[in-house]
Image: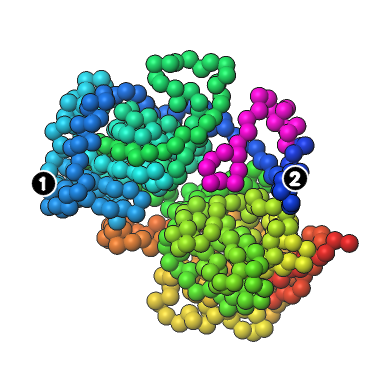
Amino acid sequence: MPPHKPYAFVTYRSQESAQKAHFHLNGGKLMCGENGVTLYLSFIDSGSVFAPLPDGLLLVEDFVSAEEEVQLMAAIDWSSSNDEVIAQKALKHRRVKHFGFEFRYDNNNVDKDEPLPAGLPDVCLPLLERCIKDGYIDIMPDQLTVNQYQSGQGIPPHVDTHSAFEDTLLSLSLGARTVMEFRHPDGRVVPVVLPGRSLLVMKGESRYLWTHGITPRKFDMVPVCDLKSSTHSGHDLETNGSLTLSKRGTRTSFTFRKIRPEPCRCAFPSACDSQGPPAPLPPSPPALPSCPSDAARLEQEFVHQVYDAIAYHFSSTRHSPWPRVCHFLSTLTPGSVLVDVGCGNGKYLGVNPEITAVGCDRSSALVQICADRGFNAFVSDALSVPLRTASCDACISIAVIHHLSTQERRLAAVRELVRLLKPGGRALIYVWAFEQEHNKQKSKYLKDHNGKQNLIKNTSEGSQEPCEYPSKCSDGACTPTDYMPVTDGKLSVHTNRTAFNTQDLLVPWHLKEGKRQEEKLETSPAPVFHRFYHVFQQGELEQLCAQVSQVKVLRSYHDQGNWCVILLKEELH
Ligand SMILES: O=C(O)CCC(=O)C(=O)O
Ligand SMILES: [Fe+2]
Ligand SMILES: [Zn+2]
C-alpha cells in the first residue's frame, strides 16, 4: 500500500484467481467501524514493468564505483550562482546546471555559437574515455546537464531536441534509484529502473522517437528482483513477476551530449524538428471509416495527434468561456460534481467555484495545460471515461462529439455521458452546426468577419471555425442527402471561410508558433494540420440523444454556430 494513498496493489498467481477475486470483492462492503467501506477493484497490467527495453536503449549497471560517485557529486557546487561560468537554473521541479553549452528550456535548444566559459568538469573525463573505449559513444561529448531531483520531483516526458544534439545521449545516475518512463507514440510505456551508479545509453529509436521522463512521486513500483543487490542474480520463483515499492531519495544525473553542428537527418521525421512537422497536407485525404478500427485510426490521426501538436496554439485561442455554457454551470447547486468530457484547456473548470469540477481530454498536452492552471484533469477517451456510473451531478461536452467519425461512436459518446450522470443529473452538449446562420442571424463569427485581419485567424472567440453561410442552403431547403461525403469517398478538406458542402470533412488548422518559430516562418510556411469534423444538421443531435435510454432532452437550441442540448437523466422507478 503506497503511503498516504487510499489504495493497495494485490498480486494473484493466475488470471483466473484475479478474476474470481474481482468478481467476489468488487463493490463489496467491508465492515470496519460504524460505517464500513466499499471496495473498488480494478485490473492493473504489470506487464509493462517487465517489457523489453526500447530499441537502442542500454542500461549499464555499476558503471562508476562508489568512490567515483562521491567525486562526481562533490564536483557540482550547487551553492554557486555565478552565471558567467555555468548556467544554473532553479527549475520548479528540480535543480539543473549546464556545462559546455547552456540548454535553454524556453526554446528547447542550445546557442551553438555561445559556449559557456566552463567546459565539462575534469572529473568527467576518465569516465567519458571509458564510454568511448567500451563503445557506448563514438565522439567525445561537449555538453553536460546535471539534474538533481529530490524525492517527489521529476522531469516531464520529452525527446531531447534532435537539432541540438547528436544521436547518443548518456545519462549517468548517481544517488537514489528512480524509475524513468519511456513512451512510444503508439502508446507503449516502458518503465526503466535506474539504480545509482548506472549508465543509461540512449541511441536510435529510444533517443529519437520515444520520450523519456520521470514522473514526480515519492515511491516507484519496481520488480522485486531490481531491489536485490546486483550480485544476486536469477529470478527465483518467489519473486519472479512480483512488484514492490521503492522509496525515492535524492537522485543526481549527469547527462552527456554532443552538440550537433548540422541539421538532423534521422529516420524518425515525425519526431524531428530538423525535418519539419509531419506532412502538412494529408497526401491522400482519408475516406470516411467503414469499420470501427478505421474510425479509431482516423480519429487518432486527424483528431488526437493534431490536438497534441497544436495544443499550445489552440489553447491561446480559447480564453473566453461561452456565456450560455457559463449560465448552465451557474445553475448547478453548490457541492455538485461536474465532469467536462473533452475539457481542452480547462476554460470551464473554474467558472463556478462552488462546484467540484473535473475535466478529461484525449490530448495529454491539453491536460497538462489544465494541470498547469491548477485544474483537476486527466487523460481519457470520451467513449470510456474512468469514472463510476452515476457519480456526477452534471456533465458538459463542448465541441467534442463532432470529432467522432461514425454515428455509432457519436451515440456511444452520448451514452457514456449519460452513464456518468446521477439520476436527476443534467448534461450539456455542444456540437458544431452545419448551419452557420440561424433565424436569419449569422453566427457571431460571421458578423465579426469584416477584414483581412481575421482571415489568418483560426477561430474567433464565441464561435467555432469560420464558415460562410452556404448560399444554396439559406432557404433551409437542403436535405441531408445533398451533403453526403464527396464523390470518390475521400473526405474533403474544408477551405476556411467557404460554405460547408459536406457534413464530414477535414478542417485545416494553421499553426502559429512561438517567437522562435516565427523566425523560421520567413523561410517556411506555417504548418497546417487537419482535424476531422462531422458537422451536425438541425435536429440531428436531438435524434441522437433520443436513442439513449433513461434520458430526455430538456432543451435544445442554436448558439453561435453550434447545436446544443441539455439532457436530464431520469430517475429509475
Ligand atoms: O535525469 C535524467 O537522467 C534525464 C535528464 C534529461 O532527460 C534531460 O536533461 O534532458
Ligand atoms: Fe532528456
Ligand atoms: Zn531528427
Q: Is residue 337 left or right of residue 88?
A: right
Q: Nearer the viewer, residue 125 or 1?
A: 1
Which percent across, then down, holds residue 158? Answer: 38, 45
Which percent across, then down, holds residue 295? Answer: 63, 48
Quadrant, the C terminus: bottom right
Q: Which residue is mark 1?
A: 117
Q: CA distance from mark 1 to mark 2?
A: 67 Å
Quadrant, the N terminus: top right
Residue drawn at x 66%, y 24% is: 13
Which region is colored magenta? Answer: 1-22
Which percent across, then down, holds residue 87? Answer: 19, 50
Residue 234 vs 111, above or below: the answer is above
Q: Report the magenta stretch's main SS.
A: loop
**Which disc is residue 31 wearing?**
2
Residue 249 vs 544, above or below: the answer is above
Residue drawn at x 17%, y 52% is: 81
Q: Nearer the viewer, residue 55 or 426?
A: 426
Q: Amino acid at mark 1?
A: Pro
Q: Amino acid at mark 2?
A: Met
N-terminal-most mark, 1 or 2: 2
Magenta stretch contains residue 395: no
Which percent across, then down, holds residue 320? Answer: 50, 74
Q: Nearer the viewer, residue 303 or 8?
A: 8
